[in-house]
Amino acid sequence: MSTQRGCQLYGVSRQSLYQARQRTARKAERAAHVLVAVRAERTKLPRLGARKLRHKISPRLRAQGMAVGRDALFPLLRQLPCTHNSSCQFPAVI
C-alpha cells in the first residue's frame, strides 16, 4: 500500500505523517542524550534524586543546545534499571 493511500484511509495528510516521524526521531535523539548524561552522573552519585540530577545535568544539556524539564525527565528515568538496591527492595506505597 502506498503512503498516499494509507494516509487517505486514516484521514491524515502526508505532511502530518512525515512531521510525526520527524518529531518521534527528534524526541528519541533527545532522550538518548539525556540518558547518557544521567548515566554519567549516576556513576558518580548513584543515589542522586531526580530533581538534583536534573539540576546537575542541565549545564551539559544546554551546551548541546537541549533542555529537559522535570516532568519530561521523570518518565525517562523510569526507563533506566534501578541503580541501587534499597529502592528496589520496597514496593511502592499505594
Image (cartoon, rainbow, N blue to C red):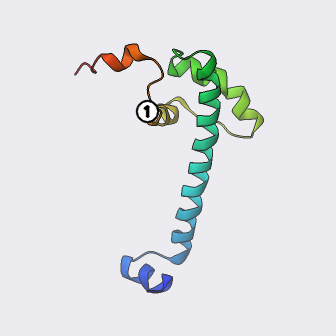
Q: Is residue 38 left or right of residue 13?
A: right
Q: Which residue is mark 1?
A: 78
Residue nearer the viewer, 59 or 13: 59
User: Compared to 3, does 77 lie above or below?
Assistant: above
Please say if 62 is above or below 44: below
- 10 Å crowding of disc 1: few (<14), some (14-19), many (20+): few
Q: Quadrant of the C terminus?
A: top left
Q: Position of residue 59 (x, y in %)?
A: 72, 27
Tally of numbered tags: 1
Which residue ends up furthest to the front in the rendered image? 85
Point 64% across, 40% down: residue: 33
Q: Amino acid at mark 1?
A: Arg
The part of the image, by quadrant, that contains residue 78 is: top left
In percent of width and height, residue 85 lies at 41, 16
Q: Residue furthest left?
A: 94
For the N terminus, give its image quadrant: bottom left
- Residue nearest the viewer, comparing 5 with 11: 5
Q: Quadrant of residue 42?
A: top right
> x, y (%) of residue 20?
52, 63
Residue lying farthest to the right in this orientation: 63
Res 90 quadrant in image = top left
Horizontal side, residue 32 vs residue 77: left or right: right
Residue under the point 53% across and 20% down: 51
Question: x%, y% of residue 44?
Answer: 63, 17
Q: Secondary structure at mark 1?
A: helix
Looking at the image, which residue is at 52% across and 69% down? Answer: 16
Residue placed most toward the observer, 36 or 15: 36
Left or right of 7 on screen, residue 33: right
Above or below for 44 versus 16 = above
